[in-house]
Amino acid sequence: MNASTLRRTAERAREAARVLSTVTGAARTAALEAVATALLANEPGLLAANQRDLDEAVAKGMEPAMLDRLALSPTRIAAMAAAVREVAAQSDPVGEVAESSLRPNGLRVSRVRMPLGVIAVIYEARPNVTSDAAALAIRSGNAILLKGGSEAKHANLAIGEVVSEALAAAGLPADAVQVLAPSDRTELVELLQFDDLIDLVIPRGGEGLIRFVAEHSRIPVIKHYKGVCHLFLDASAPLEMAVAIALNGKTSRPSVCNATETLLVHAAAAERLLPTLASALAAQGVTLHCCERSLPLVTGLANALPATEADWAAEYLSLDLAVRIVDDLDGALAHIARWGSDHTEAIVTSDQTAADRFKGEVRSSCVMVNASTRFNDGGELGLGAEIGISTTRLHAYGPMGARELTTLRFVVEGEGQIR
């Protein structure tokens, strides 16, 4: 796509955003219901498009973890449609009055939610991102440009076509959701210069992609950065709970950003917890990258390796887990502060004082007490879906739903007052 064509695409999105911001919430709800129905009705075509992506990925030698992120199935398409319907059922954020007050001079001052305008999402793999992001944009009255990676190009384009046709059938502008074909970085840089047409960029993918977008964009960027998620087993952690939470965090879906990547164990509980936990993890195929204090406690396990400093910063996205014994809660907090990525941290404890300190001192976007890191997800936290998990504190932090795609403006109503 040449520069003029790309700019015209963004201009059409801008025009669509203006229309979307004026239609009723009920109209956007009906459009979302139409999108969900269309996704289910077009399942055979979506699976066929996805199979083309999978065949090409296998031919290129893509790793199993990435193939899992890429793959669609009837179950996953049903989940995509369900997520769209859950977003449709949410209250409409556009026009919501967040606060209102009456000034001494009689002016009524309100803060009212409005759409951001046009959002561009740059992402890799996971074609369900296409429908999730589209649904959240429609719910919040925004137009969206979706630029997925080449590994999912067939599925993304097919999903985008289904969504656009459903919008048009529901009486909303088809250009409100546009999927851009994969291209080289030159076209991406061109897109990132359209600060007069695009209001926000959200990159989702590997560290290299996110850094590239942040370095080249003239548009504000919210980073969906890597998930180096920690689980800390406190001195009072119950063994059964610790094993269940660690197994779920690491093995339920290791290729996603909210999977547990580092296990921290309080020194006072290490001998009690670590041998049983390590055996349970090893039975699920997990390779343990152990510090020098933890390695002697897992002797006899073939998949226990000495850790290096690189392991503390690793987002494995695989059945690998860094393991470190720390002296106490202070040691765990210091490790997370040094190596964390502001994504998700969890503590297992029976000590409320320790739990309160952990909640108060960890600064990540989501803090779990006696729960798996895997719950840092828009659907699990009641958002229906997410457009990303922001690890940037401005203007949103954590999973971003429809409300996070709006902003607050002042609306002032008077009766002729002058200053």
Image (spheres, rainbow, N blue to C red):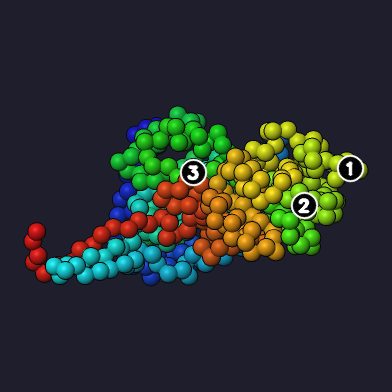
Q: Mark 1–mark 3 contact, CB under 8 Å?
A: no
Residue 223 shows which numbered tag? 3
Three-letter residue code for mark 1: Thr
Residue at image x 59%, y 56%? 357
Three-letter residue code for mark 2: Ala
Q: Tell me which numbered mark, 2 or 1, is placed earlier along the sequence.
A: 2
Q: Mark 2–mark 3 contact, CB under 8 Å?
A: no
Q: Where does the image place residue 158, in percent across and percent down from the top left?
A: 54, 50
| Residue 405 visible to the viewer | yes
Residue at image x 53%, y 65%? 382
Q: Is residue 355 left or right of residue 286?
A: left
Three-letter residue code for mark 3: Lys
Compare residues 209 and 67 and report the one nearer the observer.
209
Residue at image x 40%, y 60%? 140
Q: Is residue 8 left or right of residue 124?
A: left
Q: Secondary structure at mark 2?
A: helix
Q: Quadrant of the N terminus?
A: top left
Compare residues 355 and 378 and report the one nearer the observer.
355
How packed is label 3: few (under 14 Cα within 10 Å), some, or many (20 or more)? many
Compare residues 408 and 274 and report the one nearer the observer.
274
Residue at image x 50%, y 49%? 390
Q: Which residue is mark 2?
A: 268
Q: Viewer-nearest of labels 1 and 3?
A: 1
Q: Where does the image place residue 5, in percent across and percent down from the top left?
A: 37, 37
Distance, label 2 to label 3, CA atoms, is 37 Å
Q: Which residue is mark 1?
A: 299
Q: Tell me which numbered mark, 1 or 3, is placed earlier along the sequence.
A: 3
